[in-house]
Image (cartoon, rainbow, N blue to C red):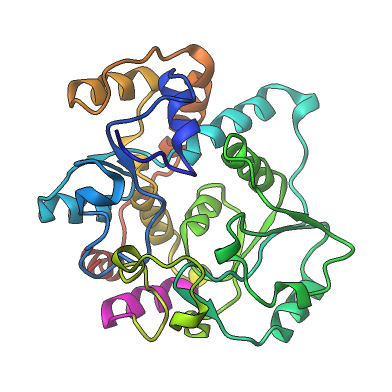
């Protein structure tokens, strides 16, 4: 049995109509995986990473890489987070008393991770915080190794700080927060960038990828050399293809709309969106699962997502975008 995902396991179970304690025969990629963008993937292409030779991939570029590597069997699906998003969004659209007009800012605080760390400077972040539209909700990572070491120097006393520690409600909580805010502030272009773009939020990428470097050995909290060496994405470790892509999307609002939508569809697997029953039957036919009982609970979510995707009528990207994307 594959190792359970601390992000997507419960959502995957609910969408397929499975018990929450179900163990899958496949692993689920944790996100867009910037560490694998534009370079060989020596982590998720290994069967030992998830204790499985099957991987649910929900970014097209990553599915393409895993397929080419030929060491695991990838399945190209949709980002599980979107199923929770669609469920809440549909409820808001159909239940007036449940709907609230988006306002203020959702602020993703700067973050380190297992092998990458941000520079010490924090004054620029505080100046930005003092100016963003109110009210403000701040997101703090739930894993201690991901928490930026200088976040406690910021003055956040008058605002809400959320740490999504419960894996059962983690994705629905994030979905609700994205829906209730108008502006989304992101330190560097990761998976949340594409979530926000899908919802047509006002996006602000406020850090530079140059402010992040690889951790030294004495700075690493969780040491596992067979894994950590492949999770690096500090600026000192990035290759030219990665730098080109990250510097391009750091200026997200300067990118043509059709290119932003194209990237969002490809990074979140929205071009292969399936209903709960369709996904269940397809995974079953490919021996990714052996049982399940999709319910009506997420049908309205699928329909909301489908309708929104259909309204994106200019998903073809420019030649510049296509050239950059093809190098990933």
The mark total stands at 0
Give me the residue at 50% from left, 21% from top: 298
- Establish if 211 lies above or below 307: below
Residue 77 appears left or right of 18: left
| Quadrant housing the N terminus | top left
Q: Quadrant of residue 134?
A: bottom right
Q: Is residue 63 visible?
A: no
Q: Position of residue 236 (x, y in %)?
A: 38, 86
Q: Please, which residue is most extreme toward the right here?
A: 158
Q: Quadrant of residue 99?
A: top right
Residue 141 appears left or right of 53: right
Nearer to me, 310 or 227: 227
Nearer to me, 307 or 52: 52
- Establish if 274 lies above or below 193: above
Q: Position of residue 91 (x, y in %)?
A: 65, 25
Which segment is the magenta one?
A: 238-250
The stretch drawn in magenta includes residue 66 = no
- Establish if 275 lies above or below 27: above
Q: Position of residue 140 (x, y in %)?
A: 67, 59
Nearer to me, 153 or 282: 153
Q: Position of residue 186 (x, y in %)?
A: 59, 66
Residue 109 appears left or right of 241: right
Nearer to me, 100 or 65: 65
| Quadrant housing the C terminus | bottom left
Give me the residue at 77% from left, 78% from top: 153
Q: Main secondary structure of the magenta part?
A: helix
Give me the residue at 26% from left, 26% from top: 283
Give me the residue at 32% from left, 63% from top: 227
Q: Is residue 152 visible?
A: yes
């Amino acid at each position: 049995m594959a190792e359970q995902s601390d992000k997507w396991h419960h959502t995957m179970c609910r969408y397929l109509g499975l018990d929450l304690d179900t163990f899958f025969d496949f692993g689920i990629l944790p996100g867009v995986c910037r560490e694998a963008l534009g370079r060989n993937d020596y982590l998720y292409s290994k069967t030992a990473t998830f204790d499985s030779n099957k991987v649910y991939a929900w970014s097209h570029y990553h599915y393409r890489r895993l397929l080419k590597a030929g060491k695991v069997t990838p399945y190209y699906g949709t980002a599980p987070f979107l199923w929770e998003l669609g469920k809440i969004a549909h409820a808001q659209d159909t239940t007036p008393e449940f709907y609230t007009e988006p306002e203020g800012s959702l602020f993703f605080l700067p973050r380190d991770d297992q092998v990458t760390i941000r520079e010490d400077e924090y004054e620029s972040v505080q100046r930005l915080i003092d100016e963003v539209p109110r009210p403000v909700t701040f997101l703090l990572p739930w894993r201690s190794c991901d928490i930026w070491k200088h976040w406690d120097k910021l003055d956040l006393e008058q605002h809400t700080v959320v740490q999504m520690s419960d894996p059962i409600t983690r994705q629905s909580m994030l979905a609700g927060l994205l829906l209730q805010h108008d502006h989304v502030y992101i330190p560097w272009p990761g998976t949340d960038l594409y979530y926000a773009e899908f919802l047509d939020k006002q996006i602000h990428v406020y850090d530079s990828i140059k402010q992040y470097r690889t951790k030294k050995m004495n700075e690493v909290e969780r040491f596992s050399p067979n894994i950590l060496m492949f999770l690096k994405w500090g600026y000192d470790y990035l290759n030219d293809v990665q730098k080109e892509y990250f510097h391009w999307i750091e200026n997200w609002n300067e990118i043509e709309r059709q290119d932003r939508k194209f990237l969002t569809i490809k990074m979140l697997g929205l071009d292969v969106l399936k209903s709960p029953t369709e996904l269940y039957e397809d995974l079953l036919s490919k021996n990714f699962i052996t049982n399940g009982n999709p319910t009506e609970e997420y049908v309205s979510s699928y329909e909301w997502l489908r309708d929104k995707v259909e309204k994106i009528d200019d998903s073809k990207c420019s030649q510049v975008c296509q050239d950059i994307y093809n190098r990933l």
